[in-house]
Image (spheres, helix red, strand yellow):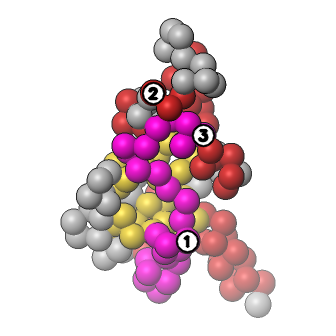
Amino acid sequence: MQISDFLFPKDNVVYINSSATMQEALDKLEQSQYTAIPVIDGEGKYIGTLSEGDLFWKMKSAPGLSFQNLDTIKVHEIKRRIHNECVSIKAHLEDMLHLATDQNFVPVVDDNRIFIGMIRRKDIIEYYTSNITD
């Protein structure tokens, strides 16, 4: 097996650009019903993960910030508290599995650190469960 066998491609992933606004991030999280999403930069490189908690803490720490002016804050201005490590598409399967033990998803990048998708822990568990029980 290879990492690519578990890849959930970028076209199917909910992610946010670092230049997007806090309002856009909140909307994406609400629409997807996810609690965290990958953040990519203008070149498509994975730069981190944004969580609901990050948005909450930003609102709490920014005087005057309210639901009416969330469009004034850019995603790259928000401190991210979750540090989801990414894995290269060429990495060993064990490297990805090690990361998946602590992360709900593992971002996958190419040799240039361009975000190409993710591996969801749910898919790993389902794969191994079906192979153990068969």
Q: Nearer the viewer, residue 12 or 96?
A: 12
State which region is magenta. 1-26
Relative to 34, is 20 on the left or the right?
A: left
Single out the residue that lies furthest toward the left. Answer: 112
Numbered disc 2: secondary structure: helix
Residue 80, picture quadrant: top left
Q: Quick check: marks 1 and 3 in contact, CB under 8 Å?
A: no
On the rendered image, what quadrant is the C terminus found in?
bottom right
Q: List x then y, in percent, for residue 85.
A: 40, 52
Residue 116, picture quadrant: bottom left
Q: Quick check: marks 1 and 2 in contact, CB under 8 Å?
A: no
Local crowd size for mark 1, using a 10 Å CA cut-off: few (<14), some (14–19), many (≥20): few
- Real-space CA distance between mark 2 and mark 3, rounded to the nearest whole angstrom: 13 Å
From the viewer's perspective, is residue 115 above or below residue 21? below
Residue 20 within the magenta-colored segment of the rendering: yes
Residue shown at the point (38%, 30%) measured from the top left:
77
* Residue of label 3: 26
Residue shown at the point (55%, 36%) measured from the top left:
23
Q: List x then y, in percent, for residue 12.
A: 55, 71
Mark 1 or mark 2, which has the lower sequence index? 1
- Real-space CA distance between mark 1 and mark 3, rounded to the nearest whole angstrom: 19 Å
The type of residue carrying mark 3 is Leu
The type of residue carrying mark 1 is Asn
* Residue of label 2: 72
Numbered disc 1: secondary structure: helix
From the viewer's perspective, is residue 98 above or below residue 26? below
* Residue of label 1: 12
Q: List x then y, in percent, for residue 79.
A: 42, 29
From the viewer's perspective, is residue 113 above or below residue 18? below
Residue 112 within the magenta-colored segment of the rendering: no
The type of residue carrying mark 2 is Thr
From the viewer's perspective, is residue 59 above or below residue 74? above
